[in-house]
DNA sequence: CGTGCATGTTCGTCAAATCGAACGATCGGA
DNA sequence: TCCGATCGTTCGATTTGACGAACATGCACG
């Protein structure tokens, strides 16, 4: 029945709490006072013997002035470079449209970053994605008609648009060599 | 004394759980079986009368195949357009560098989107941001030298780089009319 | 028209998270 | 050296989350 041996990261949470507390320069007593929690609770949590509730986590995140995610999703940054032309390219059936996935959605993150290279031609329509998704589009070069399918907006170099990704939307290049960046923000 | 009566979003979590479950097309019984939780627990949670522990949340997120954050951070989408030249511009002291904030970090989100317009000149150095921050940079036009301050990378049109934002980093335009997009991802 | 199986809810019990208070340890000043 | 303050830990009492079983309801099938 294991299937997922991904044990509950109680130790990680414990470490995160201690780390964030010490980062804020707070003592256990002080944090207890600010968060309204008992310092015994905090002590036990930081010692790893604890399974806090959301209320507890929320109180902590408020007192530490950090998003709750910081306490449960362990991060890990890196340095990556993807040269123009490299990277996983998702070409449309029709030529003249190339979407390159620059930064996919790793565990813990919730956004994809694409580079779009397109030539004038048929519009590329996208069916709705996951509800709550928001797309950010910045035109680099050329011109494009993009946005919600029922109300697209004409954009020039440097223009920016944000629109819900959970409804049908469209992208159509209006000039040769049109390049754009799309940040697809999942929820 | 907080000023923000930001009550624990128990209702939001309840709604989120139900939403995500129905999205996955799972019945309460099925989700209970997959997550190893009692369906009574799930029922109570979805009814809003509950304060789940991290173990419970973790089991849910694994069973639903979503990050835990999806259950605790509330969303909110919109449609916005910022024309080139519009929007809050943050000019550097030295001329030749303009950063425009396209999408700031509203409550619940955790990323800022900037457009950078720069001319060759002095490098612009940024001190470390919040720990865990990751910056994504895509060059639109021109050339730039960017990345960690101790190991910058030369980038051309379409090139992409991701690097930790919690260490000193730098951006220097190498050609006139250099435009880039920076996605600053907080944690 | 019953029967079988499903979904989602309610109730009593148990384990555990949280709390408040007391306890040694450490540090700084008189 | 002694005293006070603060730090973090430990210990019972209480609240509360999680579980399992029973329950009401709806739907398909014979």
Image (cartoon, coloured by chain):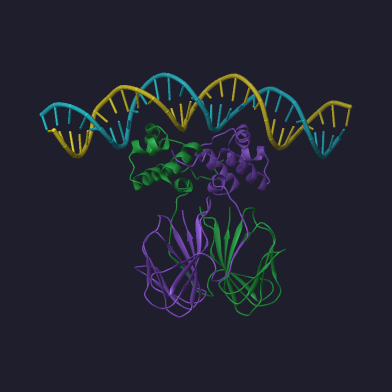
Chain colours: A green, B purple, C yellow, D cyan
Name above or below for residue A81 compared with residue D13: below
Residue A53 visible to an observer of this rendering: no
Q: Please indicate whether residue A18 sits to the left or right of residue C3 in the image.
A: left
Q: Please indicate whether residue B170 sits to the left or right of residue B157 in the image.
A: left
Work out which quarter of the rendered image holds the N terminus of chain A and state it. Answer: top right
| Occupied quadrant, residue B37 | top right
Residue beneath the point at 54% across and 35% down: B51
| Occupied quadrant, residue B150 | bottom left
Residue beneath the point at 40% across and 37% down: A45
Residue A27 visible to an observer of this rendering: yes
Residue B164, given in percent of the width and then of the height, sits at 41, 61
Name above or below for residue B76 compared with residue A62: below
Name above or below for residue A128 compared with residue B58: below
Residue A88, given in percent of the width and then of the height, sits at 56, 68
Q: Please indicate whether residue A91 sits to the left or right of residue D26 in the image.
A: left
Name above or below for residue B183 compared with residue B16: below
| Occupied quadrant, residue B17 | top right
Residue A90, given in percent of the width and then of the height, sits at 61, 69
Residue beneath the point at 37% across and 35% down: A43
């Amino acid at each position: 029945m294991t299937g997922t041996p991904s044990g509950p990261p109680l130790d990680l949470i414990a470490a995160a709490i201690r780390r964030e507390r010490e980062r804020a320069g707070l003592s256990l007593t002080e944090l207890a006072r600010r968060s309204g929690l008992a310092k015994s609770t905090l002590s036990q949590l930081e010692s790893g013997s604890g399974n806090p509730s959301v209320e507890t986590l929320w109180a902590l995140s408020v007192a530490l002035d950090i998003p709750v995610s910081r306490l449960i999703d362990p991060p890990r940054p890196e340095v990556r470079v993807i040269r123009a032309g490299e990277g996983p390219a998702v070409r449309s059936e029709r030529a003249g449209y190339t979407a390159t996935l620059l930064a996919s959605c790793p565990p813990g993150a919730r956004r994809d970053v694409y580079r779009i290279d397109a030539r004038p031609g048929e519009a590329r329509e996208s069916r709705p994605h996951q509800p709550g998704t928001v797309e950010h589009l910045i035109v680099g070069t050329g011109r494009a008609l993009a946005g919600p399918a029922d109300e697209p907006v004409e954009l020039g170099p440097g223009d920016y648009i944000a629109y819900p990704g959970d409804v049908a939307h469209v992208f159509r290049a209006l000039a040769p060599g049109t390049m754009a960046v799309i940040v697809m923000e999942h929820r």
